[in-house]
Image (spheres, rainbow, N blue to C red):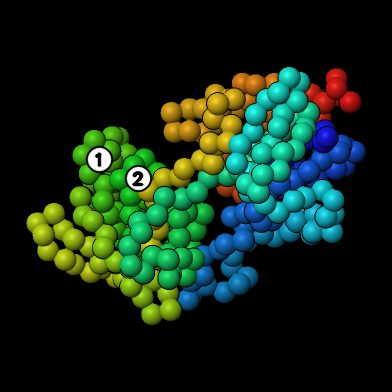
Amino acid sequence: MYDLIIIGGGPAGLTSTIYAIRKRLNVLLISKDLGGKTNYRLALPWIEEHQVIKGVEVVKKFRNELEYLKFARQMKPVERVEKKGELFLVHTKDGEELQSKAVILATGAKQQRLTVPGEKEFIMRGLCYSALSYAPLFIDRKSVIVGDGELALRSTAELATVAKHVYLVGASGGILNTALGQKLKTTKNVSIMEGYQVVAVKGNGFADRLVMNTTDGNTIEIEADGIFIELGLIPNSQMVSSLVDLNKEGYIIVDKHGCTSLPGIFAAGDVTDTYAEQVLVAVGDGAKAALSAYDYLLLKL
């Protein structure tokens, strides 16, 4: 029996766990890895190490602490969470059932991928899934955004403030009729390749070319210094979808304290309907969720 089980080992989950340990709670972190998205960063041939503030540096201290506290973590995936009376049952993929008085979900979100030749080969080597995190590195550079939603438009608009040129590939229809879409249509350093379909990513060590089918059936290839896939995120909220309220995109709805619609379940980071998918935002969310869980548990300890 645990006071608190935290699911997810990214920035939000690591922060929550260390806060809970320091509050003397009997806590367990369950995750497939430690560090989450901070384990990945975009490598670019013209960027030196000192020019990049890596998210892993922010959570490194917490991660190092947990690597020594083996009693406080289990490295395995979770399949589902259920409520039984006043307790929560956490079911892991290997069939184990763990009991807890409270749960924090910090399971993050996964990127939607193109699944085209070359994409997997160049992930984080000239190609990644977060233009907003790396836009400042593209001053006077050419970049490509692939996507057909609000995130792709927002990423294109931000890159356009610093980049030499931005290609927006795949956007079409209603999304281009929004205020931001109309603005991008008149932005001089933005080319909108409406309805084009990506068929391959190419490069030489780093991704630098994109092969696309045009709307008239031709195939073209464009060069760029960086490629960003912005098809949106899929929140890893399925394990609690029957317990707490989700928004239409599947994100867990939380209040300013990290509380969900079900007392005893808290959530933090990218799996929630938070404002931005950023490491420091997730760290703050994790701290809030842990403190809120502690307040909840004071009545049950």
Label 2 crowd bin: few (<14), some (14–19), many (20+), radius 10 Å: many
Looking at the picture, how far across and down is residue 152, in whole percent? 36, 47
Position of 160 with respect to 251 (left or right) is left
Q: In the displayed orientation, state which residue is furthest to the left.
A: 216
Q: Earlier in the sequence, mark 2 or mark 1?
A: 2
The answer for how far apart the CA atoms under marks 2 and 1 are is 8 Å
> Which amino acid, by three-letter code, is at mark 1?
Leu
Whether residue 58 is situated above or below residue 281 in the rendered picture: below
Q: How many marks?
A: 2
Looking at the picture, how far across and down is residue 61, in whole percent? 78, 57
* Residue at screen point 71% across, 32% down: 89
* Residue at screen point 61% across, 21% down: 261
Q: Nearer the viewer, residue 139 or 97?
A: 97
Label 1 crowd bin: few (<14), some (14–19), many (20+), radius 10 Å: many
**What residue sits right under mark 1 in the picture?**
176
Q: Secondary structure at mark 2?
A: helix
Whether residue 138 is situated above or below residue 242 in the rendered picture: below
Q: Secondary structure at mark 1?
A: helix
**What residue sits right under mark 2 in the picture?**
153
> Which amino acid, by three-letter code, is at mark 2?
Leu
Quadrant in which the C terminus is drawn: top right
Looking at the picture, how far across and down is residue 77, in whole percent? 63, 48
Position of 19 with respect to 161 (left or right) is right
Q: Nearer the viewer, residue 174 or 301?
A: 301
Looking at the picture, how far across and down is residue 25, in whole percent? 86, 37
Quadrant in which the N terminus is drawn: top right
Q: In the displayed orientation, state which residue is furthest to the front.
A: 95
Whether residue 23 is situated above or below residue 219 in the rendered picture: above
